[in-house]
C-alpha cells in the first residue's frame, strides 16, 4: 500500500515538473534506500511522502511535494495551532527564505518581507524586499500582529536591541514567532561582538547560509537555556518554547524548536 501511494505521488510530480524534479530536488536518493513514509505536510496541506536523505534530519528530511525541511514545517504548524488567524493579520517577516516564507507571502492578506541591505537606506526597496535593520527598524509602533524570523537571531549583533524593536512594532497581544538553533543544555554563548563599528570574534568564526549573500551569515550567538529570560529582560515579551516531534507531519530532527514570544494585552 505504501509503495502504491508513493508511485501515485511520484507520477503526478513527474508529469507536472519533469526533469526539474530530479535535478532540483534529487528525489531518488532516500527513495531507493527506503527511508520514506507517508504523512501530511503542514505547508502543502496535503498527503505526501517524507524522505530522509541523511541522518541529519534538520536539513535532509524533505516533503516530496514542496521539498520543505522540518523547521519550516514546524513554524507553519505552530502558527496554525497557536496563531490560527495568522492569514488575516499584518505580518512582518525578516530575512524570509524557503517554502514556509513562500506560504506566508501567498496566504497572508498583509505580509511585509524585509532583508538587511547594508547599501540601501532603511525603508527603501531592493530586489522586491524592504530594507530594514532589526536593531533599528523604521516601522511604526504597534504595527504588526505577528513578527516572524526563521533562524535569524543567532546572527544579530545586538539581539537586545532587536528583541526590543520587535516588541515595539507588535500590537498588544501580538507575537514574535521564531526559530533559532537552541542549545538548551547550556548557557548562551556569544561568539562575536561589535565594538566601535568593527566585529571582534570571541570564537572561531562560523557562518550559516544566507539567501541574499553567498558568503553566508556570521553566527554571533549560540542561544542557550537562558534565552527566554533574555527576551523578557530586554523586551517584556513572555516566551513559550514548542518542542515538536510529529513524524506524521514530517517534524523531527535537531534544533527545530519554535519560540512564541507574546506581547501583553492592554
Image: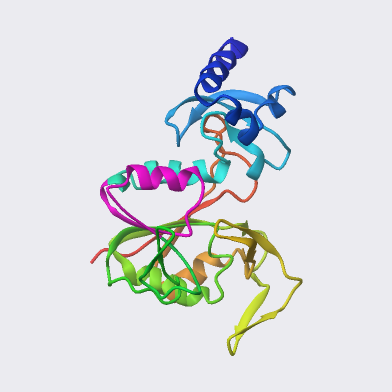
| Looking at the image, residue 161 lies above or below residue 79 | below
In which quadrant of the rendered image does the N terminus lie?
Answer: top right
Query: Residue 157 appears in which quarter of the rendering?
Result: bottom right
Q: Nearer the viewer, residue 66 or 129?
A: 129
Percent position of residue 13, x then y: 53, 22
Q: Is residue 233 visible?
A: no
| Looking at the image, residue 48 lies above or below residue 131 | above
Q: At 52% from the left edge and 25% from the top edge, which residue is drawn? A: 48
Residue 25 falls inside the magenta stretch: no
Q: How many marks?
A: 0
Q: Residue furthest left?
A: 266
Percent position of residue 232, x then y: 44, 70
| Looking at the image, residue 178 lies above or below residue 245 | below
Q: Judge from the rendering whether residue 28 lies leftward or rightward of residue 38; answer left or right.
A: right
Query: Residue 202 appears in which quarter of the rendering?
Result: bottom right
Residue span colored magenta: 88-113
Q: Nearer the viewer, residue 102 or 189?
A: 102
Q: Judge from the rendering whether residue 154 lies leftward or rightward of residue 169; answer left or right.
A: right
Amino acid at each position: 500500500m505504501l509503495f502504491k501511494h508513493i508511485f501515485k505521488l511520484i507520477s503526478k510530480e513527474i508529469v507536472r515538473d519533469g526533469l526539474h524534479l530530479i535535478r532540483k530536488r534529487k528525489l531518488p536518493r532516500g527513495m531507493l534506500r527506503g527511508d520514506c513514509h507517508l504523512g501530511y505536510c503542514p505547508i502543502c496541506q496535503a498527503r505526501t511522502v517524507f524522505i530522509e536523505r541523511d541522518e541529519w534530519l534538520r536539513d535532509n528530511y524533505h516533503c516530496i511535494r514542496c521539498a520543505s525541511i522540518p523547521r519550516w514545517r514546524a513554524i507553519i504548524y505552530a502558527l496554525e495551532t497557536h496563531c490560527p488567524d495568522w492569514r488575516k493579520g499584518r505580518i512582518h517577516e525578516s530575512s524570509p527564505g524557503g517554502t514556509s516564507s513562500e506560504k506566508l507571502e501567498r496566504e497572508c492578506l498583509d505580509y511585509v518581507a524585509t532583508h538587511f541591505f547594508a547599501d540601501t537606506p532603511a525603508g527603501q526597496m531592493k530586489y522586491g524586499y524592504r530594507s530594514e535593520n532589526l536593531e533599528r527598524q523604521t516601522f511604526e509602533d504597534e504595527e504588526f500582529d505577528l513578527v516572524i524570523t526563521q533562524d535569524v537571531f543567532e546572527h544579530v549583533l545586538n539581539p537586545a536591541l532587536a528583541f526590543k524593536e520587535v516588541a515595539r512594532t507588535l500590537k498588544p497581544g501580538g507575537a514574535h514567532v521564531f526559530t533559532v538553533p537552541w542549545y538548551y543544555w547550556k548557557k548562551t554563548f556569544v561568539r562575536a561582538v561589535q565594538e566601535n563599528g568593527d566585529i571582534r570574534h570571541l570564537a572561531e568564526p562560523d557562518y550559516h547560509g544566507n539567501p541574499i549573500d553567498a558568503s553566508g551569515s556570521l553566527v554571533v550567538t549560540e542561544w542557550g537555556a537562558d534565552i527566554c529570560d533574555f527576551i523578557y529582560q530586554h523586551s517584556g515579551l513572555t516566551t513559550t518554547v514548542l518542542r515538536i516531534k510529529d513524524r506524521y507531519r514530517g517534524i523531527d530532527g535537531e534544533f527545530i524548536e519554535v519560540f512564541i514570544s507574546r506581547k501583553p494585552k492592554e
